[in-house]
Image (cartoon, rainbow, N blue to C red):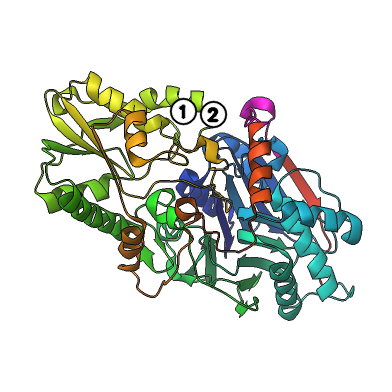
Amino acid sequence: MCGIIGAVATTPVNQILYDGLQVLQHRGQDAAGIATAEAGRFHMHKGSGLVRDVFRTRNMRNLVGNWGIGHCRYPTAGSAFNPAEAQPFYVNSPFGLMLAHNGNLTNADQLKRDMFLQDLRHMNTNSDSEVLLNVFAHELQAASQNRYQMDPDTIFRAVSGVHRRVRGAYAVVAMIAGYGLLAFRDPYGIRPLIIGRHETIQGVEYLIASESVAVDTLGFKILRDVEPGEAVLIDIHGRFVSRQCAERTIHAPCMFEFVYLARPDSLMDGISVYETRVKMGEFLADKIRHTMPHLEVDAVIPIPDSSRHAAMELASRLGMPYREGFVKNRYIGRTFIMPGQASRRKSVRQKLNAIAQEFRGKNVLLVDDSIVRGTTSREIIQMAREAGARRVYFASASPPVRHANVYGIDMPTRAELIAAFRSDDEIRREIGADALIYQDLDALKAAVRAVNPAIAQFETSCFDGSYITGDVTQEYLSSIEASHGGHGKGNPDDAEGAQMDLNLVPAD
C-alpha cells in the first residue's frame, strides 16, 4: 500500500510532489523518494524515514524541473527493508526510465529468472518494483524494435507487454527521459490511481496519485480514475493521451482500501471512503440488533481514527450514546504498519490513552475497523478495563481477516492472523472481550457497493481466501510465509538519503 504521485506542471514541480507525498504519508512510512526532470537530466533524492525527514532544503533545491514522480514506501510481502529499495528506481536502457510502484507482483521470482536468462537484465535489489521497471524497459525496447524512437503507440505497446507478463497488483507512475509521464494500472484495478487536472495561465497541469486527497489539497480538480489495464501518457508539453492496454479487464478494487488504508476524505473508483465507513456502521448496527439484542451498552467508543465514522453511525442506529474514550498521539506511526509484534505492543500504549471518565463503571462497545493480528485489540481492551470498564464488547467493521494478502498489504502469513485458525469465540477469549461482533462479508460488500453500484466485484482475499488474479498457489503462499519468518524489517537508520543526477539523451 505505498503512496505514488506524478505531475507535469508549468512551474517547478518539487514542492507539488513533496506536498503530495505529505498527504499520502499514511500509505507508507518506511522511506520516501522524489525524481524530477529538466533538459534531459533526471534528479533524484530518496532515503529512509518519513517524507519530512528525508527531504531537506538542499535536497529540494536540487530537484529541478517541471515534471516528476514521488513515492512513499510501505513494506509488502514481509520483505526485509533495504534502504536501496527506496523508490523511484532507475534504468538507462533502452531509454532513461524512472518508476515508482504501489502493489505487489505475484510472479516476481519467475520474472527475475526470465530477465536474467532471456532478457539479460540484472536486479540489484529484492524489490518487485525494480523487476517491474526492468520488464517495462525490456518491453519498451521490443516495442521500439531497437529504433530507440519514442511515440505513444510504442509506449502503449510496451505497457501491453507488461500486462501480458506481469501478475499481481500494480499501480505505476513512470518517467521517460525527454518524453513525459506515464501511469498505468493492473487489469484488475486492485490498487487505486486517480487523475487530476489544473488550468493555469501558463497552460494545463496534470497530477496522478494514489488517492484523491493529493489531488484536492494541491488545488487540482478530479478528472477521473485510471481504469484497470489503462495507460495514461502526458508528455512534457502537457499533451494527454490514454489507451486501454490489457486484453481482458475486471474492475475489482481492494476492499481493505475502504476498510482501513485510505483516508476518509478520499474518493477512489467513484467511491467515497467516508460514505463507505458510515455504511459499514449501518450494516454492523443491523447485525448487532438481530444477533445480540441483549447487550446493555452505556457508550459506543471508536478506536481512533479510521473506525470513528462507522462507530458514530452504529451508535445513532442503535440509539446508544457515542463517546470519545481514547485520545490519540498523532506523532506515533500506524501500528498496523510497524514491523514486529513487540513494536506494535509497545506503540499501542504510546499511541492511545484512555479517558477514564468514559469507562469507569460502564459497559462499553469498542468499534474498530478490523482485527488483523489481535495485538492492538488485546491491548486496547486491557486499557479499557484498567480505566474501570465493567464490561468490554468489541465490534469489527470488517469480517475476520483469515488469509494472507499478496497484493501489497503486509499480511503475509496466516500464522500472524488471529482469526486464521480460530472461531469467533476463540478470538473473543484471546483478545479478552466480553462479546465480539464481526461484520459479515456480504454486508461489507453491500456497504461499499451502496456508494457506487457500478462496482460489481472487489478484491477480498484476506477475508475469503479467493485471489482475484487466479495465479496464487499454495506453493506461492508457503514461500512467502517461509521468507517472512526469516527476516526482520531492517533499521531505517542504516543509511542516509541518496542524491543523484543523471545525464540523459532525450528520446527522438
Circle 2 is placed at which residue position? 340
Residue 351 in which image quadrant: top left
**2, 411: nearer the viewer:** 411
Query: Residue 383 appears at what percent x and percent y?
Result: 28, 23
Q: Residues within 10 Å of mark 2 (few under 14, many from 20)?
A: few
Above or below 106: residue 294: above
The residue positioned 55% from the left and 59% from the top of the image is: 467
Residue 239 in which image quadrant: bottom right
The region drawn magenta spans 486-498
Which element is circle 2 on? loop
Above or below 356: residue 212: below
Question: Predominant secondary structure in magenta?
Answer: loop
Q: Are marks 1 and 2 in contact (CB under 8 Å)?
A: yes
Which element is circle 1 on? helix
**261, 255: nearer the viewer:** 255
**199, 278: nearer the viewer:** 278
The residue positioned 75% from the left and 64% from the top of the image is: 136
The residue positioned 46% from the left and 39% from the top of the image is: 421
The residue positioned 20% from the left and 26% from the top of the image is: 355
Q: CA distance from mark 1 to mark 2?
A: 7 Å
Circle 1 is placed at which residue position? 344
**205, 128: nearer the viewer:** 128
| Disc number placed over residue 6 in the picture, else none | none
The quarter of the rendered structure image containing the C terminus is: bottom right
Q: Is residue 22 left or right of residue 246?
A: left
